[in-house]
Image: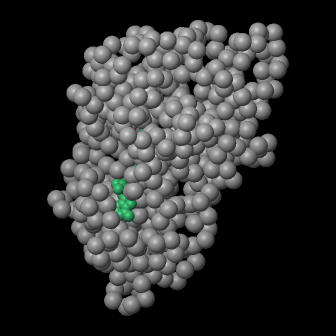
Amino acid sequence: MSVNTNARIVIVGCGISGVAAAQRLVKAGFHNVRIVEATARSGGRIKTGRLGNNIVEIGANWIHGPSEENPVYHLARQYGLLDPEALTPENQAMDVGGHPPWVPNIFSSSGRKLNVEDLYPALEMFAELLDESSEFQSRGGEPWTNVGDFIRSKVQQRAAEKWKDIDGTTRSLRLSVISNMLKVECSVNGAHSMDEVGLGAYGLYKTLPGLDCTFPGGYEGLVKNLMSVLPAGLVTYSQPVRCVHWNNTEKRGYPVTVECDDGNKIAADHVIVTVPLGYLKKHHSTLFHPPLPLHKLHSIQRLGFGTNNKILVEFDSPWWDTDCEVIHLVWEDEDAMVDQVPDVQRYWIKKLFGFTVLKPTERYGHVLCGWIAGHESEYMETLPEQEVSHAVTQLIRRFTGNPTITPRRIMRSQWFHDPWTCGSYTHPGKGCSAQDLQNMMEPLPTKSSQSQPLQVLFAGEATHPCYFSTVHGAVLTGWREADRLISHYSSSSSSELTMSKL
Ligand SMILES: Cc1cc2nc3c(=O)[nH]c(=O)nc-3n(C[C@H](O)[C@H](O)[C@H](O)COP(=O)(O)OP(=O)(O)OC[C@H]3O[C@@H](n4cnc5c(N)ncnc54)[C@H](O)[C@@H]3O)c2cc1C
């Protein structure tokens, strides 16, 4: 079947979804493809940097679920970007349901290293409740609107039954651990609070088997390899798009015009928009002319897009155990199961749930990655780096009881104030359903319209029905929209052929 490959296709955004779409279209023979990117680089939320001599990730960190079904795993393996352990069948077969069984160290705000055994019941109860939160998606009729309320009320019930003979101090500590785990989930989900994550839609997110792995040479290696097959000059950098004019009525051939900030106008048959949901929330009214249909707009508003940032910290020597993979910082005054601080400016640092340890030590030395979500994280972005460093140092000294610990250097991400991202990634907000993600990916004009089809298409992590918030989700959406156009032209050229035979 022949494909008409002359169509003019503009892709807005050179993140991994835009690159994936371009790669697929170019491979199918389309030769009028271009990407317009606001910044001076490709990769978007895949961003590798340096902390001293170390390669560190400022954005995406892991391949979540590195196994056969994961396109990122496939590509990374094909390009030779992974460590041998990640390639083993045992690694691929581990099904951890999105929560890798990391070895924890737990410290408390009174400067004690806590006995993990004593706290396991709380960790287990929390894990059970997260699993249960996923079940409402298929069942419907959820008892609470959001995951936070569901977990809190269930812990209250179950603690009353199961922990009734436990002493008050341990019980209170376990409840404070629940607060810590709620903050972990704020980071995982990219949400300010688990009270903002819809219970009915929480289970829409699906995981893949495989123990999460990283890119030893940096995640950006994936982007570079994918881009290496694109013709030179296909991407125009530092070219923000101001408005996508669709349904053009002037009969000059092209249904869409992409208007850039510098006034440049690009005529196109099709535009694939890959800008982040955070950007869409803020700029939808000026980015599209005519405006988006209401059902699409409402889905953009219902879906959540919060902030999760990293604070990378390097030390001369470790203050955690050799086998430790994650450090939790538990505030003893938080037995009310809270994941938000009362006064953001004063207590923002309390939202940092702890650190993951960069492994292997031979490669990274002693580097921790702190995780902080929500409005507290957004406030952190506004502070001078020195102030962040001071707050982290005080925090670690307090929790370890060691007043001499001093980081060698720190570095933090600032995804909320990145004008082209406006946050970190997507989560299902309260009242969301599978239909919202369907609406996100629906091309314009909608099916009922008489105008030229597939003028504006939508890709990017926020448009994947079950892998939103991930790199593999983003790749799949880029391929999906490229395939939509490829099959459109395959079927239109075959129907043209059929017509001419009649
Ligand atoms: C801190 C953090 C940690 C993460 N960790 C992981 C992880 O461990 N594993 C994982 O799988 N995922 C992770 N993610 C999510 C992952 O990074 C994203 O899902 C994925 O990279 C999104 O790709 P995308 O192409 O959809 O969007 P983006 O990468 O955001 O690409 C969109 C592009 O559009 C450009 N753009 C925006 N507006 C305009 C405009 N007006 N004109 C032109 N260009 C514009 C942007 O500059 C950007 O380059 C993480 C994200 C963050 C922030």
What residue occupies the far left of the structure in this picture?
Answer: 232
| Residue at 27% over, 16% down | 362
| Percent coordinates x, y for residue 284 in the rendering | 49, 67
500 horizontally vs 210: left or right: left
Work out which quarter of the rendered image holds the N terminus and state it.
bottom left
| Residue at 77% over, 30% down | 154
Res. 92 image quadrant: top left
Res. 365 image quadrant: top left
Name above or below for residue 110 compared with residue 348.
Answer: above
Name above or below for residue 366 compared with residue 188.
Answer: above
Q: Nearer the viewer, residue 410 or 218?
A: 410
| Percent coordinates x, y for residue 89 in the rendering | 40, 23
Q: Nearer the viewer, residue 374 or 257?
A: 374
- What colour scheme was applied to this rendering of the protein? one colour
Q: Nearer the viewer, residue 94 or 366?
A: 366
21 horizontally vs 94: left or right: left
| Percent coordinates x, y for residue 56 in the rendering | 31, 32
How many discs mark residues in the rendered view? 0
228 horizontally vs 499: left or right: left
Work out which quarter of the rendered image holds the C terminus and state it.
bottom left
Name above or below for residue 479 compared with residue 173.
Answer: below
Regarding residue 73, the answer to whether it shows in the image is: no
| Percent coordinates x, y for residue 355 in the rendering | 46, 25
| Residue at 46% over, 23% down | 394
167 horizontally vs 461: left or right: right
Q: Nearer the viewer, residue 328 or 8?
A: 328
| Residue at 28% over, 65% down | 239
Regarding residue 316, the answer to whether it shows in the image is: yes
